């Protein structure tokens, strides 16, 4: 289900105009386009102000956001934003949803749905940019999409912060111990292409039959117990870890570029709760 690089780039291109859109174009009188487009722009400008006032992220308050309206095919119609690269942030996820969920009986696209996404490999900017996408219906027909997104400080990855330098994979089960998710849910994610076989076996420590997509319960319990025991063998008291870490220094020839290196002398003691 994950889009290829070619698909991601193709999502950025406008879709061909539909017969209905071309027919509507013929009905426009002089000045209609300017009036209607300005009405949409004013609506979006107000949405942006509301978004900023109700949010708590300082990225949001600084204008790192988008509120947008899109055609039924996912192309951006207009947007109000503070960072212009966000003009394409929502278009790719919407088109991916259209291609993969619209005719999927297990998901579908229905009135009242809200899709929430942030995976950069599906066409977003980076995983800290989180996006809410809403299909707009009129008399049961999908006529447009609305989007709202911003940069979030914390998005529940493998390490604190929104930009995860240590992340080795996408997808998974969010915050928490990787040994806690229900094994069958992990196997279902492998089947659906959300995580890899390697991640299921080596990160979540789940044993399963790749032909029947069923969990080997006893083997999974054994693998997870072995991992817990191995963690204890690898672990160290935080004070010991910190003492060893602060003694690490770059090679002397590299230090010549910087002149000095902190000696880890305590200036202000940190209170840990």
Image (tube, grey):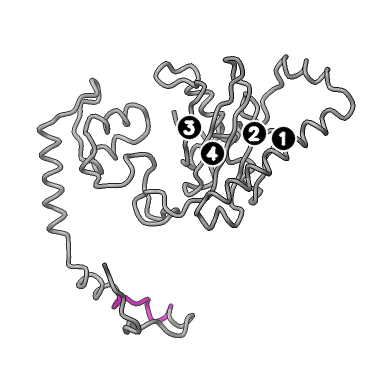
Q: Quadrant of residue 210?
A: top left
State the mark number for residue 115. 3
Residue at which label 4 appears: 123
Residue at the extreme right = 30
Q: Earlier in the sequence, mark 4 or mark 2?
A: 2
Q: As drawn, is 116 to the left or to the right of 27?
A: left
Which type of secondary structure does the marked residue at label 3 adopt?
A: strand
Which callout, 3 or 1, points at the residue further toward the start of the chain?
A: 1
Most foreground residue, 209 or 218: 218
- Identify the residue position indicated by label 1 in the image: 40
Q: Are marks 1 and 2 in contact (CB under 8 Å)?
A: yes
Q: Is disc 4 in contact with disc 2, using a CB cutoff of under 8 Å?
A: no
Q: Contact (CB < 8 A) between labels 3 and 1?
A: no
Which quadrant is home to the N terminus?
Answer: top left
Precedes in sequence: disc 4 or disc 1? 1
Q: Residue at x 37, y 77 (%)?
A: 251
Circle 4 crowding by C-alpha within 10 Å: few under 14, some 14–19, many from 20 = many
Separation of marks 4 and 3 at Cα, in angstroms: 15 Å
Q: Nearer the viewer, mark 3 or mark 1?
A: 1
> Can you tell which of label 4 and label 1 is closer to the viewer?
1
| Between marks 4 and 2 in the image, the one whose residue lies nearer the viewer | 2
Check the image and report above or below for 203 versus 29: below
Magenta residues? Answer: 246-254
Secondary structure under badge 4? loop
């Amino acid at each position: 289900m994950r889009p290829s690089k070619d698909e991601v780039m193709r999502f950025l291109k406008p879709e061909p105009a539909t017969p209905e859109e071309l027919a509507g174009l013929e009905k426009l009188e002089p000045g209609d386009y300017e009036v209607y487009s300005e009405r949409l722009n004013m609506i979006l400008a107000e949405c942006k102000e509301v978004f900023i006032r109700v949010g708590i992220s300082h990225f949001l308050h600084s204008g790192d956001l988008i509120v947008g309206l899109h055609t039924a095919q996912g192309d951006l119609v207009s947007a109000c934003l503070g960072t212009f690269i966000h003009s394409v942030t929502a278009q790719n996820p919407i088109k991916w949803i259209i291609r993969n969920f619209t005719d999927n009986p297990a998901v579908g696209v229905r009135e009242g749905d809200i899709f929430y996404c942030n995976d950069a490999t599906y066409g977003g900017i980076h995983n800290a940019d989180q996006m809410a996408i809403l299909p707009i219906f009129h008399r049961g027909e999908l006529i447009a999409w609305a989007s709202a997104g911003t940069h979030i400080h914390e998005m529940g990855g493998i390490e604190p912060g929104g930009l995860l330098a240590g992340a080795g994979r996408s997808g998974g089960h969010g915050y928490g111990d990787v040994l806690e998710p229900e094994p069958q849910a992990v196997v279902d994610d492998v089947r659906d292409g959300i995580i890899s076989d390697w991640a299921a076996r080596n990160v979540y420590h789940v044993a399963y039959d790749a032909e029947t997509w069923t969990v080997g319960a006893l083997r999974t319990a054994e693998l997870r117990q072995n991992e817990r025991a191995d963690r204890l063998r690898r672990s160290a008291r935080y004070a010991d870890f910190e003492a060893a870490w602060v003694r690490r220094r770059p090679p002397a020839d590299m230090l010549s570029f910087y002149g000095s290196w902190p000696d880890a002398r305590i200036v202000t003691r940190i209170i840990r709760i």
